[in-house]
Amino acid sequence: MKKWVKGVLWGVGIVATGGTIYAIRLNKSSKKLEIIPRVNLHKLALTGITLRVDTQIKNPTGVQINLKYPFVKLLFKDATVGTSQVVNKDVTFPKNGEVTLDPFFIEIPISGAFSLAFEIYKALLAGTAIKVKVYYSTIVKALNAIPIPFESSYEVTIKK
């Protein structure tokens, strides 16, 4: 085999190995991301509830991380009561840094007297604190080619 062919094959192997090692390191680093969600009542009306979800994400690793803007889902009593809009935007997290995302506004329409949304509405109207689960789902992008799914959930308390 010619020397240049061997050189090309070695080069491709080295690049593939380096890319794989970077993807594994990025996968481990993405699991260390710390998400701090805050959910606040934005609007309480007869037609429904609007909740504001503020999200701060901290990257305590030595690796810069790129990910798609997260999709947020709110669960109450293990049932989905509202979701965010899907945003096709990339977010870059610097090494050992943090980013505060634009707030998510999640609307929960009041659909009936026996719905979970109505239960939330009554509790907030009465000033009772309720617990909801905030679920985040996104894709961590390695080398702009290898997608790594990232999901996490947190329980937060909402008060009027």
Image (cartoon, rainbow, N blue to C red):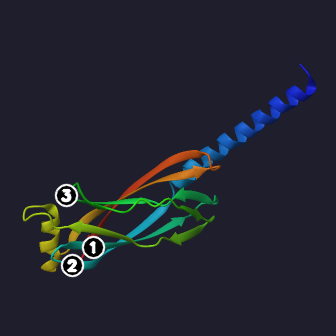
Q: For the residue carrying disc 1, how many other residues have a C-alpha within 10 Å: few (<14), some (14-19), or many (20+)?
A: some
How far, Cα to Cα, is label 2 from label 3?
Answer: 20 Å
- Marks 1 and 2 in Cβ contact (< 8 Å): yes
- Kind of residue at badge 2: Leu
Q: On the image, numbered disc 2 is attached to which residue? A: 44
SS for dot 1: strand
Left/right placement of residue 7 relative to residue 23 reads right
How far, Cα to Cα, is label 1 from label 2?
Answer: 7 Å
Q: Quadrant of residue 43?
A: bottom left
Q: Earlier in the sequence, mark 2 or mark 3?
A: 2
Residue at horizontal 65 percent and vertical 49 percent from the top = 143
How far, Cα to Cα, is label 1 from label 3?
Answer: 18 Å
Q: Residue furthest toward the front?
A: 47
The answer to whether residue 1 is above or below residue 144 is above
The percent coordinates of residue 120 (x first, y second) are 17, 69
- Kind of residue at badge 3: Lys
SS for dot 3: loop
- Kind of residue at badge 1: Thr
SS for dot 2: strand
Instruction: State which quarter of the image contains the N terminus.
Output: top right
Q: On the image, numbered disc 1 is attached to which residue? A: 50
